[in-house]
């Protein structure tokens, strides 16, 4: 199962958005310079660069994700783009939705360890994921499947 944040813009759409916003800022600055504000283009250029960097950083944050793999003996969570892998025994892992700071957190817990998953998902998506994981864990650890 792959968990990824929702991303509306493609890379091409992001570039277009940055160009349009920079063009608007520079056009407004040119009008300001025409009326005597000689520093307006400089500030518009600085603003455009800062805005492009901020939007790019926010867009790149959408690359993160988590891959959840479940088999008869283990449940593994791999964080992307990093290489962090955490493995739980599927017979002992518990799925919990606990209240947090303004939102519910989805936790996997086993043998005193807890791991939050899906922090980038919306509230409803975390609740749906919790239900799916509980069903999949129940099916994978059911005694009649052995």
Image: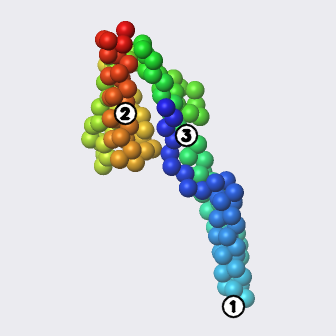
Q: Mark 2 points at which residue?
A: 132
Q: Tell me if 143 is positioned left or right of 71 in this view.
A: left
The answer to whether residue 67 shows anywhere in this view is yes
**Outermost residue to the bottom:** 35
Q: Mark 1 points at which residue?
A: 35
Q: Nearer the viewer, mark 3 or mark 2?
A: 2
- Residue at 36% over, 13% down: 145
Mark 1 secondary-structure assignment: loop
The answer to which of marks 3 and 2 sits earlier in the sequence is 3
Name the foreground residue: 34 vs 132: 132
- Residue at 26% over, 41% down: 99
Q: Which of marks 1 and 2 is in front?
A: 2
**Residue 136, quarter of picture:** top left
**Residue 8, quarter of picture:** bottom right
Name the foreground residue: 54 vs 79: 79
Mark 2 secondary-structure assignment: helix
Question: Do the residues under discs 3 and 2 have CB atoms within 8 angstroms?
Answer: no
The answer to which of marks 3 and 1 sits earlier in the sequence is 1
Q: Mark 3 points at which residue?
A: 64
Q: How crowded is mark 3: few (under 14 residues within 10 Å), some or many (20 or more)?
A: some
Q: How crowded is mark 1: few (under 14 residues within 10 Å), some or many (20 or more)?
A: few
């Amino acid at each position: 199962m792959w968990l990824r944040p929702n991303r509306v813009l493609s890379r091409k759409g992001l570039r277009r958005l940055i160009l349009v916003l920079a063009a608007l800022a520079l056009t407004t600055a040119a009008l300001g310079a025409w009326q005597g504000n000689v520093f307006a283009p400089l500030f518009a250029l600085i603003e455009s660069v800062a805005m492009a960097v901020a939007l790019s950083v926010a867009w790149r944050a959408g690359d993160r994700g988590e891959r959840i793999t479940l088999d008869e003996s283990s449940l593994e969570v791999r964080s992307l783009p990093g290489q962090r892998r955490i493995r739980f025994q599927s017979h002992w892992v518990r799925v919990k939705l606990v209240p947090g700071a303004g939102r519910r957190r989805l936790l996997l817990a086993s043998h005193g360890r807890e791991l939050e998953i899906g922090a980038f998902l919306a509230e409803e998506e975390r609740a749906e994921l919790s239900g799916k994981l509980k069903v999949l864990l129940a099916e994978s650890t059911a005694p009649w499947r052995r």
